[in-house]
Amino acid sequence: MESAPRFNIRGLRFAFSRIFHLFFTRFVSQGFIDTNKMPAYGMWHLGLYFALGSEASNDLDYIYGLLAVTKSPIAPDYSKSIREVNLEFMTWALPFWKSVQKRAKKQNWEALCKDEWRYELSSFLNSHDVGLKRLYGLPSWVPVFSRADRRKAIVRDPTERRSAFVTVPELFNRLSIAIVCDSIWVKGIKIQVVKTVYEKTISNTLTSYGLQQCIMSFTQSSKDMHPTGKTVLEVLCCTLLRKEAYENYAFDVGLCTGCWLYYSGKLVTSKLGMEWSQKPYVKSVLSEWLEAGQSFDGNKLFTTEDGYIGTMSEDVLPGDVVCVLAGSSELAVLRPEDDHYLSVGCCFMIGLMNGEVSEFLAPGRAKIETIEIR
């Protein structure tokens, strides 16, 4: 479980970042700060465009409002459709994004911010691309801005996360992305193919009464090994809770399954056992698992042909391809269709999210190629 001090620090960082963005937005809109003379604040532009906490009365108000605040050359035209405006926005935003990337490399932001600046820039596929819903006739990779239309983003602990492409210079030294008509052409690496999708979606029922059945579906024994060298049970527990490490997983999951078997009447225990189940630690473990089930309600669990376990909020299917893409800090899931791909969304997958993809390139198990997403 996350310690209270660490949780409080994360909360304070989030609160102060929100306050900073509010004040900075106001200063820019009133002309007190010229972001064109402060190259580092190009990151602020992009972060503002794809912020998760923003909202507006309608999509056109949202995008034109942001473009006005950030002094974009795009003039409002409410006679245009959302499809036209969002494509126009991305056609303008991509070269701007590339210019920020180029300045960042020239000014050696890596020395100060490590991978964090790159991670923050590369988030729109994770949170905003329209995906298979194809709302407003948009291509699957184009962003939507209404909170009701946006996907549930993969959110990882900033102290642990790294961009999926961080060990592949060909994917981060240059932003190898181009927009041609309705397609986006991007360099990437296809690393896994989805094999099976668990029949039940994540819920607080699955992380309580359904936990034992879920574990049995993914493991034959407690010694089953994952490609990372960890046990399958540990990786499954991490995946369900969206943790990248879980020291007490075996003890905690044993507590959970035992308690829920007892609560369901399938396990008889002594008075001492009943009293023990009310201990604060036991309650906190049960609460953590229930909260995870509620937070990730509706998400899918799936396995790949090589035995990796992933989870995502969209309707992933067998045959979908897990990829590392230039410009996408999280693992992207694409669906093959004829000679191109559709964007399904991004996934959480232990063992491939933090640059491990380079291990596939060296022995020739994967290659860098240009992928068309429509």
Image (spheres, rainbow, N blue to C red):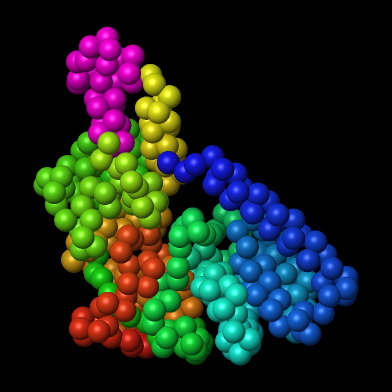
Q: Furthest residue to the top?
A: 271
- What residue lies at 43% left-to-right and 24% top-to-bottom? 280
The percent coordinates of residue 115 (x first, y second) are 51, 73
Left or right, residue 39 beside residue 156: right
Image location (x, y in percent) of residue 17? 68, 58
Decide whether the magenta segment is chiefly helix, strand or loop. helix
Residue 290 in magenta?
Answer: no
Q: Determine if residue 98 is in view.
A: no
- Find residue 23 and report its image quarter: bottom right
Is 232 displayed left or right of 278 in the figure?
left
Across and down, in percent, residue 299 comes to: 38, 50
Quarter of the image where one finds residue 338: bottom left
Q: Quadrant of residue 268?
A: top left
The answer to whether one can see residue 157 in this image is yes
Image quarter (top left, top right, bottom left or bottom right) of the N terminus: top left
Foreground residue among 197 and 36: 36
Count of numbered badges drawn on the protein? 0
> Above or below — where is 292 with respect to 346?
above
Left/right placement of residue 30 relative to residue 270 reads: right
What x and y, as percent, mark residue 263?
Answer: 29, 20
Q: Viewer-proximal residue, 213 or 253? A: 253
Question: Most extreme residue toward the left, as rendered?
Answer: 220
Q: What residue is shown at x 18% (from left), y 66% (from top)?
A: 305
- Residue at image location 39% in from the left, 21% down from the top: 279
- Can you say whether 59 is above or below 42 in the image? above
The answer to if 258 sits in the magenta stretch is yes
**Which residues, given as a range, are shown in magenta?**
252-277
Q: Is residue 115 left or right of residue 260?
A: right
Classify the position of the C terminus by image quarter: bottom left
